[in-house]
Amino acid sequence: MKLHHVRVYKSDENLARTDQLAWKIAEVAADPVAVTPEVTEMVINRIIDNAAVAAASITRAPAISARAQAETHPATPGSTVFGITKHASPEWAAWANGVAVRELDYHDTFLAAEYSHPGDNIPPILAVAQHAKKTGADLVRGIATGYEIQIDLVKAISLHAHKIDHVAHLGPSAAAGIGTLLGLPPEIIFQAVGQALHTTTATRQSRKGEISTWKAYAPAFAGKMAVESVDRAMRGQTSPTPIYEGEDGVIAWLLDGPDASYEVPLPEKGEPKRAILDSYTKEHSAEYQAQAWIDMARKLHNEHPEVNADRVKSIVIHTSHHTHYVIGSGANDPQKYDPTASRETLDHSVPYIFTVALQDGAWDHQTSYSPERAGRADTVKLWNKVTTEEDKEWTRRYHSNDPAEKAFGGSITITLDDGTVITDEIAVADAHPLGARPFARADYIRKFRTLAAPVLEEAEIERFLALVQRLPELTADELDGLNIVAKAGVLSDGPKGLF
């Protein structure tokens, strides 16, 4: 990997195009380096993972609405849309499928200077691959680039520190991945990356307070913009330049300001794109920082049955800055303790999530969020006794670049009414590569079978699994099969809008 120094330049400094971050991203995307076998295998895992969580969400309102919009934009050849057999224009298929993948907050993650769900790259890249009649091998290359660029940006540039949503790294990465897929030259990818970034910078209010359904749409919008940006760039249209480094650009006005500088890691020419191997998926449907706490709660449920709403005096979760201030009590969001809050809000409340997992000894992507479950009297009573505190050491480990010590958990102190104190700690979720039960191919398949069973026929489940595991050898005609079609009668018509 090579570190690229990135800073703000005044207009009269005339930063050369080839020295701009967007160009360097484009060069990485255009590099025809081969994809390694382990990366190919992980790409297959993540396509299975995306299909699993999409299956679980295609009957939910945001996915229904997005799918209805996509259906009003048919195209030939077009791209497949989760749940149905109709083809849509690739940008609208990316939109609908992106919402389905993101709705339950249940797919992969990478956390560093910024946060990300790099699996969000897959819907737009796959949609373009189907429409452009590319092969499975082409798709693997495109997805490897999308993961590489997003994860490299996430390692170097914080967006949330300036209340910019993390999808600002997704627009450029998806555009780069599409560029790789199509074999475009750096000149075109450069313009697409710039346009994608310019159109996908938005505030983090979508993840604050009363969280709305837009949380699922935000990454889908970034993917849709990436597809459109590539289309415009292929037609010769240009982008704001330099988009990152300009004195009126993203860094100067949206991020760390005119005196900012970053060291962005990117693969050197000829170096394989391996970043997908640094990411990790979710066993549970909740914000990633809650994954380890669900596992901890399940453990305590079995080991300490005396921990209940009547006996607990207080529960303090000692954790990282992010967990405390974004999904913990440090956010100062009263909605995180509101039993009538939306599902999107509850899955960003670690006090709620820990409480329910502790009481139930399990976690379910539907019933754990139901209004009946959230409103249970003993749950509300215990929930209000759970708080979080930042621990500097857990914050340090959260930001560590050493995979062996990077952590997303913390320690816990439970005080009972008789003065008994119970303590424990967990560094990473059980499903993490360094966790108690790291996810492997069999786990991805089991997750898909479990989530797909209520909405897909058994034959459809087996067809998809057999096809996706042959990904590198799939022909262009076979690529349409990387879709899931719901059982008859499962899907409802979407609401009417303008289209």
Image (cartoon, helix red, strand yellow):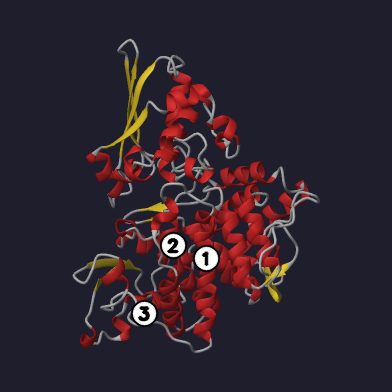
Residue on which disc 1 sits:
221
Q: Nearer the viewer, mark 3 or mark 1?
A: 1
Horizontal placement of 82 versus 231: left or right? right
Q: Nearer the viewer, residue 375 or 123?
A: 375
- Residue plotted at (66% across, 64% down): 497
Q: Is residue 4 visible?
A: no
Disc 2, disc 1: CB below 8 Å? yes
Label 3 residue SS:
helix
Q: Does 371 appear above or below 470? A: above
**Callout 2 environment at 10 Å: few (<14), some (14 to 19), or many (20+)?**
many
The amino acid type of the residue labelled 1 equals Phe
Q: Does 231 appear above or below 102? A: below
Label 2 residue SS:
helix
Q: What is the C-alpha distance between the residues marked 2 and 1?
A: 9 Å
Residue 286 location, x and y as percent?
Answer: 49, 43
Residue 488 location, x and y as percent?
Answer: 81, 51
- Residue plotted at (21% across, 86% down): 13
Q: Nearer the viewer, residue 393 or 143?
A: 393
Residue 23 image label = 3
The amino acid type of the residue labelled 3 equals Trp
Image-quadrant location for residue 468: bottom right
**Callout 3 environment at 10 Å: few (<14), some (14 to 19), or many (20+)?**
many
Disc 3, disc 1: CB below 8 Å? no
Residue 167 image label = 2
| Nearest to N terminus: mark 3 or mark 1 | 3
Q: What is the C-alpha distance between the residues marked 3 and 2?
A: 20 Å
